[in-house]
Image: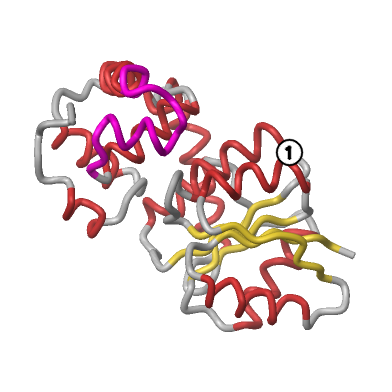
Amino acid sequence: MSTIVLADDHQVVRLGMRTLLEAEEDFSVVGEASDGLEADRLVERLKPDILIVDLMMPGINGLEVTRHVGQRVPGTRIIILSMHATESYVLEALRHGASAYVLKESSANDIVHAVREVLAGRRYLSPPLSERAIEIYVRQASEETVLDPYEKLTNREREVLYLAAQGYYATEIAEQLSISPRTAEVHRSNLMRKLGLHSKTDLIRFALSRGIIPLDETLCASSEDWSS
């Protein structure tokens, strides 16, 4: 029996996927999470065969969940579920260690097929993404990783980057991550130095270019003042 954890902030999506997957005799959904931090902890505890995680999650996004799980629970294979079919999102997912990238508009059969492909040790991208695209993305990821300053960030700095790019203040970041506001400010300062960024606008542009946040996440991030 292959075990699966579902992570999506919409309960109706999780219910639909659970119903779909448990219709397969050899699949068992053993846990659900509604935000990235919860998903991270749940996978570390349950060590499922598969994690299906939404790309954009509260807490930390699906990319950072993927990175954390790859480091701490390497036996769990990860399927990113997303509404975004652009190259930057797919490349980031593969770079972070995802085995599959499934579009939310895909058919039910596509999701089941993705799980079976990943369990068999293969990569999978939803149509219209192709096998050729996988090869290109993986090669680019391998070539770029050595020179990529983003790879120099710690896990905590990546978490702070994600939250800061959404417009959260230091106090809010601290609350989300269970750290002090001063520590949140230090992490933010360090990550901006490592990335060569000088303002909140620079940080948001970087996050958008890397597919870390979608365009609509910037609507609440209009102020340059992060100190509150």
Magenta portion: prevailing SS class: helix
Quadrant of the image occupied by residue 161: top left
Tell which of 5 and 97 is nearer to you: 5
Picture coordinates of residue 155, whole percent (x, y): 49, 28
- Magenta span covers which residues? 167-184
Q: Image height check: is 164 above or below 22?
A: above
Mark 1 surroundings within 10 Å by alpha-carbon count, few (fewer than 14), some (14 through 19), many (20 or more): some
In the picture shown, does residue 12 fall above or below 38? Answer: below
Asked whether 178 falls inside the magenta stretch, the response is yes
Using residue 85 as the reference point, say whether residue 130 is left or right of it.
right
Residue named by callout 1: 74
Q: Residue at x 18, y 51 (%)?
A: 220
- Residue 129 in picture, x, y percent from top left: 49, 67
Q: Which residue is more in the foreground, 193 or 124?
A: 193
State the image coordinates of residue 14 (x, y, percent, origin top left): 59, 71
Q: Nearer the viewer, residue 212 or 188?
A: 188
Left or right: where does residue 183 sit relative to residue 123? left
Specify the amino acid type for callout 1. Pro
Which residue is depicted at the point 63% across and 74% down? 111
